[in-house]
Amino acid sequence: MTKKSTQEQPRDLAQEVYSWVKQELRNGSLKAGMRITETDLSKRFRISRTPVREALYLLERDGLITYEARRGIVVTRLDQQMISELYTMREHEEALAASLAAQHASEIEIATLGELIDLEQEQISAAKSTNLLNQRIHGLIATAAHNRFLNRNLGLLNGSLCLLPTMLEEKARALEAHHQHREILSAIRNRDSAAAGEAAAAHIRS
């Protein structure tokens, strides 16, 4: 990690730290319950604690970190009620995104979605690759909905999902998810809004 320019704004540095922590959650390097300290982040990025504190504030706002007595700042641990609430919201939002994507996705977005799903099939036995592809597939569907407010909501929900272990490490579930992605893609290609929403909702419920 190179030393940061003194001209770089604190808010830009805070965003960099914020993005790095979220990426570490997505790839599984940071897991629920792990401690995060201002000192460690300041040393990693070779920056002062001011932008680190700003990044931690953003992460706490998004529910990704919490403060625990005697332990300090930790990656949030979701309880059963929180998980239930999260998936209830995700089912609704993902269904809406797929439905809107069927109406508004460009041909390039649909073609790219198909390429990602083909790649998913090729890498179905590689759990880490499959998980990252799954995130890209859902991210593209959200983008293809062309609704900035929905996209923002899904970004927050999917950030929280990174706090949970992925089920895609199980090959049977990875294959099931892949077939469900194909069903969503087919409905989007056919511009069938209702079918796309139903396929996405069924995918999340499963």
Image (tube, rainbow, N blue to C red):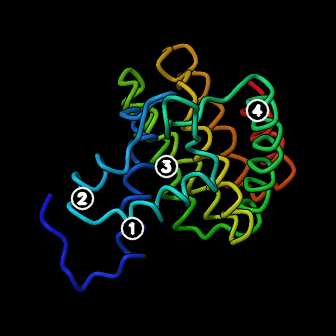
Element marked by disc 2:
helix
User: Mark 4, residues whose alpha carbon is within 10 Å: few (<14), some, or many (≥20)?
Assistant: few
Residue 199 location, quadrant: top right
In primary-sequence order, the first of circles 1 and 4 is: 1
Disc 2: which residue:
45
**Which numbered tag is attached to residue 82?**
4
Q: Amino acid at mark 4?
A: Met
In primary-sequence order, the first of circles 4 and 2 is: 2
> Do the residues bearing badges 4 and 2 touch, measured as CB atoms within 8 Å?
no
The residue that appears at 23% across and 86% down in the rendered structure is 7
In this orientation, which residue lies closer to the viewer: 149 or 24?
24
Q: Nearer the viewer, mark 4 or mark 3?
A: 4
Query: Could you tell me residue 200's position as x and y percent?
Result: 75, 41
In the rendered image, the residue lying farthest to the right is 194
Q: Is residue 85 above or below residue 167?
A: below
Query: Could you tell me residue 81's position as x and y percent?
Result: 81, 27
> Do the residues bearing badges 1 and 3 touch, measured as CB atoms within 8 Å?
no
In primary-sequence order, the first of circles 1 and 3 is: 1
Q: Amino acid at mark 2?
A: Phe
> Do the residues bearing badges 2 and 1 touch, measured as CB atoms within 8 Å?
no
In primary-sequence order, the first of circles 2 and 1 is: 2
Disc 3: which residue:
136
In the rendered image, the residue lying farthest to the bottom is 7
Q: Nearer the viewer, mark 4 or mark 2?
A: 2
Q: Quadrant of the C terminus?
A: top right
Mark 4 → mark 2, Cα distance in angstroms: 32 Å
In this orientation, which residue lies closer to the viewer: 31 or 95?
31
**Which numbered tag is attached to residue 51?**
1
Mark 1 → mark 3, Cα distance in angstroms: 28 Å
Mark 4 → mark 3, Cα distance in angstroms: 24 Å
Q: Nearer the viewer, mark 1 or mark 4?
A: 1
Q: Nearer the viewer, mark 1 or mark 3?
A: 1
